Image (cartoon, rainbow, N blue to C red):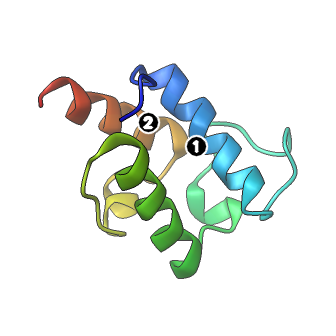
């Protein structure tokens, strides 16, 4: 499990994953950019879900991106889930 648990740390990690997936260049988007605008398609959504599960031990489904459509909202939601377990 990761020690990355604050919303700011999680959003930085998500940004890194998006850049790693090769969808967009670092600095070309913000944490308030909708995930759909950074190319988060179904394949990358599944990959990000798996990464979240591996790093945080949280089971998440791709529908989480409908509930939390931006990087910041997703980071906030994940941080809240980590605090309640």
Residue for point 32% across, 59% down: 64
Query: Which percent across, then down, holds residue 43?
Result: 55, 80
Residue for point 84% across, 43% down: 26
Left or right of 41 in this view: 83 = left
Give the mark nearest the N terminus, 2 or 1. Answer: 1
Secondary element type, mark 2: helix
Question: How much space separates mark 2 and mark 1, taking CA atoms?
Answer: 8 Å
| Quarter of the image where one finds residue 14 | top right
Query: Which percent across, then down, holds residue 53?
Result: 35, 54
Left or right of 38 in this view: 62 = left
Q: Quadrant of the C terminus?
A: top left
Query: Which percent across, then down, holds residue 45?
Result: 50, 69
Within 10 Å of disc 2 (Cα), the crowding (few <14, some 14-19, many 20+) is: many
Residue for point 33% across, 38% down: 78
- Determine whether 14 is above or below 69 in the image: above
| Quarter of the image where one finds residue 75 | top left
Residue for point 33% across, 29% down: 79
Asked whether the residues under the numbered discs 2 and 1 touch, taking CB atoms below 8 Å apart as contact, a structural biologist would say yes
| Quarter of the image where one finds residue 5 | top left
Left or right of 18 in this view: 29 = right
Within 10 Å of disc 1 (Cα), the crowding (few <14, some 14-19, many 20+) is: many
- Determine whether 48 is above or below 45 in the image: above
Q: Is 33 in front, or is 81?
A: 81
Q: Is 30 in front, or is 59?
A: 59
Name the residue beneath numbered marker 1: 14
Instruction: Name the mark on residue 75.
Output: 2
Q: Residue furthest front?
A: 1
């Amino acid at each position: 499990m990761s020690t990355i648990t604050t919303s700011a740390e999680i959003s930085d990690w998500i940004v890194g994953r998006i850049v790693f997936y090769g969808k967009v260049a670092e600095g070309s988007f913000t944490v308030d950019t909708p995930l759909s605008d950074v190319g988060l398609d179904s394949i990358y959504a599944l990959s990000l879900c798996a990464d979240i599960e591996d790093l945080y031990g949280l089971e998440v489904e791709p529908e989480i991106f409908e509930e939390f459509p931006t990087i910041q909202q997703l980071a906030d939601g994940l941080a809240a889930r980590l605090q309640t377990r």
